[in-house]
Image (cartoon, coloured by chain):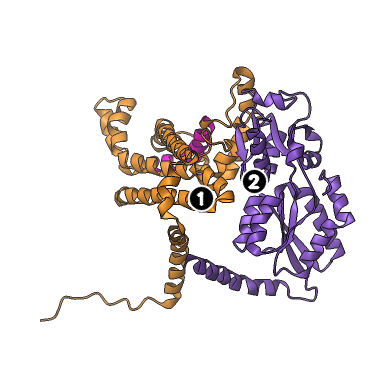
Amino acid sequence: MTHTGRRSIVSLALALTLPLTAAGCGGDAERGTLTVLAAASLTEPFTELAERFEEQHPDVEVRLAFDSSATLAQQVVEGAPADVLATADGATMLTAAEALDADPLAFATNHLVLAVPRGPGPVEGVADLADPDVSWVACVPTAPCGRVAATLLEQGLIAGEPVSLEVDVKAVLARVVDGEADAGLVYASDVVTAGDSVRALPLPGAADERTVPSVLALPGAPGSAQDFVDLLLSREGQDVLRAAGFGPI
Amino acid sequence: MPTAVRAPSPGRPPLVLLVPALVAATLLVLPLVALLLDTPWRGLLGQLTEPAVRQALWLSALTSLATVAGCLVLGTPLAWLLARVEFRGRALLRAVVTVPLVLPPVVAGVALLTAFGRAGLVGEPLREAFGVTVPYTTLAVVLAHTFVSMPFYVLAVEGAMRTAGGRYDDVAATLGADRWTTFRRVTLPLALPGVVSGAVLAWARSLGEFGATITFAGNYPGTTQTMPSLIYSTLQGDPELARTLSIVLLAVSVVVIGALRGRWLVGAGR
C-alpha cells in the first residue's frame, strides 16, 4: 500500500515537472539535458568529460551532481530523475543495477591511500595512525571508500581509530587539506586531483582491495546517456581518467 | 420570543482560500504520515537497543542537556543584559545574537571551524599553548549546539523579562535590594515561563542539530555521532533503520510541541 502511494507521489511530481521541462526546451535550439549522478571521487574527471561532451554535442547540456555513491544509488532506486549513474565501486552499483534490472560497466580502478598534508607532519606512515595523538579521518562504512577502510581496519592492516567518519571521500580530503586532520584515507585519484596541498603515503593491503568505478546509462534515458558512457570508455575518456589518477580496468 | 441574536454567518469559506490551505496542510502532514506508515514497528525495539543506536541516543541526550545547561548559565545573563541594561550598541548586540537563528547550520559549522578548528583563529593558539583540540570531541558537539540553540533561549527569556516589565525591579530597588538580589528574587521568578519555554526550544533545537555538528564536530560513534548524524549516515546503507530512528525524533518533537503549547499560550497571553 505504501509502495503504490510512493509511486503515485512520484508520478505526481513528474506530472508537475514535465510542463516545466517542455517549456525549458522551447525555442529553436532545442537543447536537451543529460543528468549525470557521479560519486564524489569522480568530481574532477567527470567535470572535464562533461565539458568535452558538451563541445562534441552542442545540443546537450550536461548537469552533474556529486555525492556519496551510496546516496546516489539510493536516489536512483527511489526514482530520482537522472540519466547516468556512476559509482565509486561495483558493490554500490549492484544495488541500483539489480533494482533497475540493468547492466553496469566498469570503467576504471582506484585504491585507497593515506593522504597527509604536504610537508613534515605527525604521520609518515600507516603505523603512525595508532598514535592516539594523531587525528585521522575516513569515510562512513556505507560509502565505498569507507567500506575499504573498514576492511583494512578489520584485517588489522590499520591500527588505531579515526576521529571522524565523513559522508564522502571529498569531505575526508577537505579535513586533511584544511589541516583539521593529520591524515585521511582517500583514493589515490583524490590526491592527484587535490594538487600540491596533500601527498599520498602507501597503504599496505589497499592494492588487494581495489575499487572498480562503474557506470550505468539508466533505463529510459535519452540516447545521449549511452553517448556519455561511450565517451567514458573511449580512449579520450580513459586518458582523462588516467590524468586524474585512476587506474585502467 | 426571538431566539438569541446570532452573529451574521460568515458564509462558506471561499475555495480560493480553502484549496491552498488544504494543500499546505497536506504538505506538512503527508511526509510524517508516510514515515509512520513505512516504519517497521515490529523490529523497533530491537533496533533501538543496537550499540550504535544506543550510543547515539545517549550522546544526543547528553549533549542536548549540556546545551540547555550552557544556555541557562550563559544565556540568562545575556537576556537580562539585553532586557534591563541600557548601553550603547544594545540593538546591535541583539541583532548579532539573532543571527545564528537564521544562519544555515552548515555555515555555522564552517564559522565554528574557522574559529575553533585546529588551524582556527582561537583553535590554533589553544592547540599550541595547551595541546587542546576542540573538533572531533563531544565538547565540540555541545559548542555547536549551544551556538545554534542559544538565540532561541535568549530571545524567549528576554521577551519574558520585557513583558514582565521593570516596575517590580524598581520597587525592589527602592526597598533596598541590590541588582543581583533583584535579579534572583524578582526578575528571574517573573520570567520563569520564558526560561522554561526557552529551555525547551533550545533543547529541541539541539536535539535536531545536524549541519553545524557534522561540519564542525565530525561524525564518530560514541563521541560526536548524535541521532541526526546517525540517521544521515544510516540512510546511505539501511534506509529502513533510518526511518525507524527518525520516528524516535519525531516522537520527541511531538512531545515537545505538546509540552510547549501550554507554555507558549501562557506566554503570548500575558
Q: Please name the residue that numbered disc 1 is placed on.
A: B242
Does residue A178 appear in the picture of this structure? no
Judged by its main secondary structure, the magenta piece is helix
User: What residue occupies the far top of the structure in this picture?
Assistant: B129
Residue most extreme to the bottom: B1
Which disc, if any, is residue A143?
A: 2
* Position above or below: B263 against A119: below
Residue A123 location (% of width, % of height): 72, 25
Please state the horizontal and vertical placement of residue A43, each as a whole percent of the image.
Answer: 75, 49
Of helix, strand and loop, which one carries label 2?
Answer: loop
Residue type, mark 1 in image: Ala
| Residue A209 visible somewhere in the drawing | yes
Q: Which chain is orange?
A: B
Asked if residue B145 is among those painted magenta in the image, a careful observer would answer yes
The magenta segment is B139-159
Q: What percent of the width, then of the height, locates residue A100?
A: 65, 64
